[in-house]
Amino acid sequence: MDEEQPKRTEPRKKEIDPVKDKHLLFVGRYGTKEMGAVWGAERTFEYALLAQAEAVQTLAQLGPEIVPKEHADEISAAANLQRISPDRIRELEEKTGHDVIAINKALEEVVSREAAAHINKGRTSADTTETAKALQIKKSIEIILEFLFPPVYSEAVTGGVAMSGSYFIV
């Protein structure tokens, strides 16, 4: 009897360059490029910088005597990877042994001394990392919803869309 051998499961092929996208190689085999882009090291830096920018803006809004609006605006304008090099963050992290301290120091380097005094004011490292993770999870959920329900997803994010008796709340 000639039994047919079961077919071996092969990883899905992805559009990932193994040199340029080294940080996405695991994703290339087991995940999607979209999710890799949300959870990659540089995107994590971006989300942490966004968390810092939003926090200082909120503090300036609630307590302008604590953080002047012009300093919050300066920090927010600089809190991105166009102004801060990911390599500089990595270099500082190697020296300090701490990711959020490295991000904050890199941000301090690109703003005035006056504005730098307000970076991470009233916050802990966990406030930054947990907020960044929450933003990444939110983006991941949006990607999943868009994948599962492409025709209605764009309508779902603008309100609530009835679908099979339930509603999306995004």
Image (cartoon, rainbow, N blue to C red):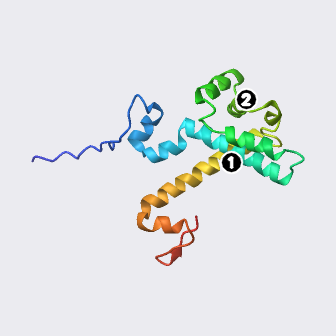
According to the picture, the residue beneath numbered tag 2 turns out to be: 105
Distance from the alpha carbon under mark 2 to that under mark 1: 19 Å
Residue at x 56% of width, y 40% of height: 43
Locate residue 17, reporting x and y percent.
38, 33
Q: Earlier in the sequence, mark 2 or mark 1?
A: 2
Residue at x 26% of width, y 43% of height: 8
Question: Between residues 38 and 25, which one lies in front from this camera angle?
Answer: 38
Label 2 vs label 1, nearer the camera: 2
Locate residue 95, reporting x and y percent.
69, 21
Can see residue 126? no
Residue lying furthest bottom in this view? 165
Residue at x 10% of width, y 46% of height: 2
Three-letter code for the amino acid on which mark 2 is drawn: Lys
Question: Between residues 94 and 46, which one lies in front from this camera angle?
Answer: 46
Residue at x 58% of width, y 64% of height: 170
Locate residue 61, reporting x and y percent.
81, 53
Horizontal relation, residue 117 to residue 11: left or right: right
Three-letter code for the amino acid on which mark 1 is drawn: Thr
According to the picture, the residue beneath numbered tag 1 turns out to be: 131
- Element class at badge 2: helix
Question: Between residues 12 and 20, which one lies in front from this camera angle?
Answer: 20
Residue lying furthest right in this view? 65
